[in-house]
Image (cartoon, coloured by chain):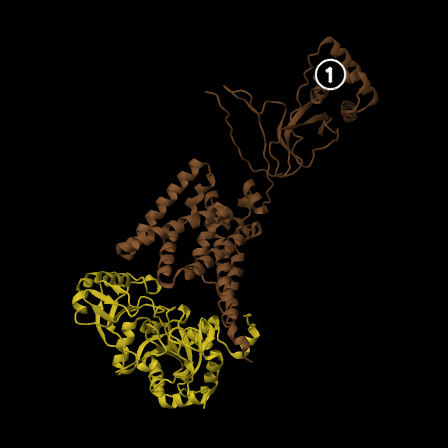
């Protein structure tokens, strides 16, 4: 059966320095196989160029100029047409014919956010004891700043057995990395004893876990601010943080949708369970089971319908959802739906604000790379814990005093 | 209605939640003493030992198995209250005022079966109403027959008097009257009416419901301004004495007036709410500061304390 297959490879690269290209073996020059007509013209072109130039650099510069002219001269036009218009092939053969060692460099022009980028080629020539790089499209000498060298030489990049019509495409994303991760990637970490005690010294998997853990204090700070300075009511003190962490995995709107669906449906089930007169622990366990069943069916149904994002439902903490359902349901019975709306809405608002703060790339960058900032955060929280002023909502609660003079 | 500026609130000496928690509860209430008031069973025993009047307890259910004996425990009793020992904010209190055959009738007229009472007791035991879901015990005690003086001012529930006591001095008081909206409960945030009471005389000052000043009880239509609490000195005395009883520096004493037995301590609260300020139209922070300024050392004599409180906080003469 024949079908299209796509393989993805991902790599993170950074540029160490611009040098490091000179120390290579000069390739043997293999004279090109030419038809006699082509050989004659080639001879003429090379002679004309050699007459005008004294060094390989000048020769190459002139060659690129003449190839890239809007209307190349008669000889060059002939060569181009017999090579099917491919400038690069002409250039390489002319250089070989002139007995100048040269090779192709394959690589990619780096541009942030580009997709379907194809491989590009530069030309490298030997000038005495140096390698010089030319951009065949412009004839400019030197390696462009944004060019990522994939390979030297024109060996094939992709070998496919048993398939056809294969192509290679590149998708590019720019990422700003701190110096210490570079050092770590380079394996210089042992030379930096202080860094050896940073999070970067952990295995990558654990680093990922810490990336999430280090965000929790930020979410907690948001909750502290909302409760102490604003006076927002939430159901369960830190439940909103866990919901916010789930939102980070699911994206906000999807997360809200899943949360409301699961809690809404769970409340309905819980309403039925309250008739059975169950003991508390058994009842919550029953809700946990129902929530998991619900999450499973939500995943399967949405997957079949083609909403792959709904699979992220698994990132919601099941036990927390079950407790939320239980609390909301008791609140409903005791204080009425109004209080459920107040506390549920408060919790969701807190979760959204915590999510928005925690998902800011600056916050993520600072918490992960400078975990020591948490000590400052601790100080802020200690100060807030001593705040004896009014809460924002108290200015509303005690509004009736506004009339007293 | 517009919001109020924090500057104005400070001028009026209104106590905010953060200040209450840090400056008063945190500073004057020893953590070790909290269980004495959080567990109503302990409070009740303590009060009985102290010779204070409390609603009579006739049964305690400690575990699920004992719920089977509920029917025999209730036999011959028509009026009783089932409540959790560690409930907060009036949660889980079930009042039965009448029995008709198999049915137990609530003051609202709703009727329950024995099965429902057992379910309620189960919920209490599993910690549904206690702080943090801790396992709890069920208390069954006499229903309070409230003083007829309040019959005009309460709907389907027992009105109680909340007195805030700071360092043994009564600083502010209010009467909490249940309404149809509050479903027979006396909690202000559930829609009960709060009536500010003058510390000096026991006369009503203002009445508020849902933070808004009102003149008449929303259900009975009676005007609050004629209300005077009988035996006011006795009530202040009872509240002030609780300071010696539990040792808390800042608490709220909830007192009910029983038709036959007079004032009784219903429960104490180590974290009394702030709505009492709205009912009194005055700031609690201001009064607490005056106590801090005026008394040192604190008087051990209850009558002396009440006299000073009256002198400092009486609004009518």
Residue A61 is left or right of residue A286, and the answer is right
User: In the rendered image of this protein, does residue A271 appear above or below residue A76?
Assistant: below
- Total tally of numbered discs in the picture: 1
Residue B73 is left or right of residue A48, and the answer is left
**Colour yellow, chain:** B
Pick whichever, B124 or A160, lies toward us.
B124
| Screen quadrant of the C terminus of chain A | bottom right
Q: Which quadrant of the figure has residue A134?
A: top right
* Residue found at the very far right of the displayed protein: A52
Task: Give the secondary structure at mark 1.
Answer: helix
Instruction: Let me know if residue B79 appears in the view.
Output: yes
Q: Position of residue A167 (x, y in %)?
A: 57, 25
Pick whichever, A62 or A249, lies toward us.
A249
Q: Position of residue B279 (x, y in %)?
A: 45, 77
Residue A335 is left or right of residue B141, and the answer is right
Pick whichever, B223 or A81, lies toward us.
B223
Instruction: Let me know if residue A207 appears in the view.
Output: no
User: In the rendered image of this protein, does residue A1 appear above or below residue A368?
Assistant: above
Q: Which residue is mark 1?
A: A81
Q: Position of residue B170 (x, y in %)?
A: 40, 83
User: In the rendered image of this protein, does residue A122 appear above or below residue A403?
Assistant: above
Residue A165 is left or right of residue B143, and the answer is right
Rendered hue of chain A is brown
| Screen quadrant of the N terminus of chain A | top left
Chain under disc 1: A
């Amino acid at each position: 059966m024949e079908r299209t297959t796509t393989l993805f490879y991902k790599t993170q690269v950074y540029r160490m320095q611009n040098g490091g290209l000179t120390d290579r073996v000069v390739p043997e020059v293999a004279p090109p196989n030419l038809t006699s007509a082509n050989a004659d013209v080639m001879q003429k072109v090379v002679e004309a160029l050699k007459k005008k130039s004294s060094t390989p650099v000048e020769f190459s510069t002139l060659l690129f100029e003449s190839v890239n002219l809007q209307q190349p001269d008669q000889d060059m036009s002939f060569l181009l047409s017999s090579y099917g218009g491919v400038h690069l092939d002409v250039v390489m053969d002319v250089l070989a014919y002139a007995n100048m060692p040269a090779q192709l460099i394959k690589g990619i022009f780096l541009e942030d956010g580009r997709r379907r980028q194809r491989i590009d080629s530069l030309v490298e020539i030997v000038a005495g004891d140096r390698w010089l790089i030319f951009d065949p499209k412009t004839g400019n000498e030197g390696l462009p700043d944004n060019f990522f060298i994939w390979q030297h030489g024109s060996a094939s990049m992709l070998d496919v057995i048993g398939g056809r019509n294969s192509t290679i495409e590149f998708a590019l994303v720019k990422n700003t990395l701190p110096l210490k991760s570079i050092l770590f990637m380079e394996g210089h970490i042992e030379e930096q004893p202080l860094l050896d005690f940073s999070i970067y010294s952990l295995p990558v998997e654990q680093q990922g876990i810490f990336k999430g853990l280090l965000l929790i204090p930020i979410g907690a700070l948001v909750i502290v601010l909302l409760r102490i300075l604003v006076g927002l009511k939430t159901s369960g003190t830190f439940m909103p943080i866990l919901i916010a962490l789930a939102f980070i995995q699911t994206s906000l709107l999807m997360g809200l949708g899943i949360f409301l669906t699961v809690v809404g449906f769970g409340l309905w089930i819980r309403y039925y369970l309250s008739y059975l007169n169950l003991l508390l622990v058994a009842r919550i366990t029953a809700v946990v089971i129902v929530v998991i069943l619900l999450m499973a069916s939500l995943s399967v149904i949405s997957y079949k319908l083609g909403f792959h994002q709904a699979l992220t439902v698994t990132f919601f903490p099941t036990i927390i959802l079950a407790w939320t359902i239980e609390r909301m349901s008791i609140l409903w019975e005791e204080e009425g739906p109004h209080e459920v709306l107040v506390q549920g809405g408060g919790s969701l608002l807190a979760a959204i604000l915590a999510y928005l703060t925690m998902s800011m790339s600056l916050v993520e960058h600072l918490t992960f790379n400078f975990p020591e900032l948490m000590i400052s955060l601790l100080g802020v929280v200690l100060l807030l814990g001593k705040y004896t002023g009014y809460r924002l909502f108290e200015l509303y609660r005690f509004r009736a005093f506004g009339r007293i003079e | 209605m517009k919001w109020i500026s924090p500057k104005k609130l400070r001028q009026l000496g209104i106590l905010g939640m953060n200040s209450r928690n840090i400056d008063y509860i945190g500073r004057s209430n020893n953590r070790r003493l909290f269980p004495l008031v959080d567990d109503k069973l302990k409070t009740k025993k303590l009060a009985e030992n102290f010779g204070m009047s409390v609603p009579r307890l006739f049964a305690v259910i400690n575990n699920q198995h004992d719920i089977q004996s509920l029917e025999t425990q209730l036999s011959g009793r028509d009026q009783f209250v089932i409540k959790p020992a560690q409930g907060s904010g009036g949660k889980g209190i079930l009042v039965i005022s009448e029995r008709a055959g198999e049915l137990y009738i609530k003051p609202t007229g709703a009727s329950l079966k024995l099965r429902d009472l057992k379910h309620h007791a189960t919920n209490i035991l599993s910690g549904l109403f206690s702080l943090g879901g801790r396992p709890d015990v069920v208390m069954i005690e006499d229903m309070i027959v409230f003083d007829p003086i309040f019959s005009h001012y309460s709907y389907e529930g027992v009105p109680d008097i909340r007195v805030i006591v700071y360092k043994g001095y009564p600083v502010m008081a209010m009467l909490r009257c249940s309404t149809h909206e509050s479903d027979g409960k006396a909690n202000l945030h559930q829609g009960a009416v709060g009536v500010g009471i003058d510390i000096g005389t026991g006369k009503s000052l203002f009445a508020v419901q849902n933070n808004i000043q009102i003149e008449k009880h929303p259900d009975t239509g009676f005007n609050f301004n004629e209300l005077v609490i009988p035996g006011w000195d006795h009530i202040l005395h009872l509240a002030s004495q609780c300071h010696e009883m539990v040792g808390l520096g800042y608490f709220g004493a909830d007192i009910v007036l029983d038709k036959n037995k007079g004032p009784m301590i219903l429960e104490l609260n180590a974290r009394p709410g702030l709505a009492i300020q709205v009912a009194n139209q005055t700031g609690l922070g201001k009064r607490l500061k005056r106590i801090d300024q005026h008394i040192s050392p604190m008087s051990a004599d209850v009558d002396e304390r009440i006299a000073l409180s009256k002198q400092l906080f009486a609004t009518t003469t």
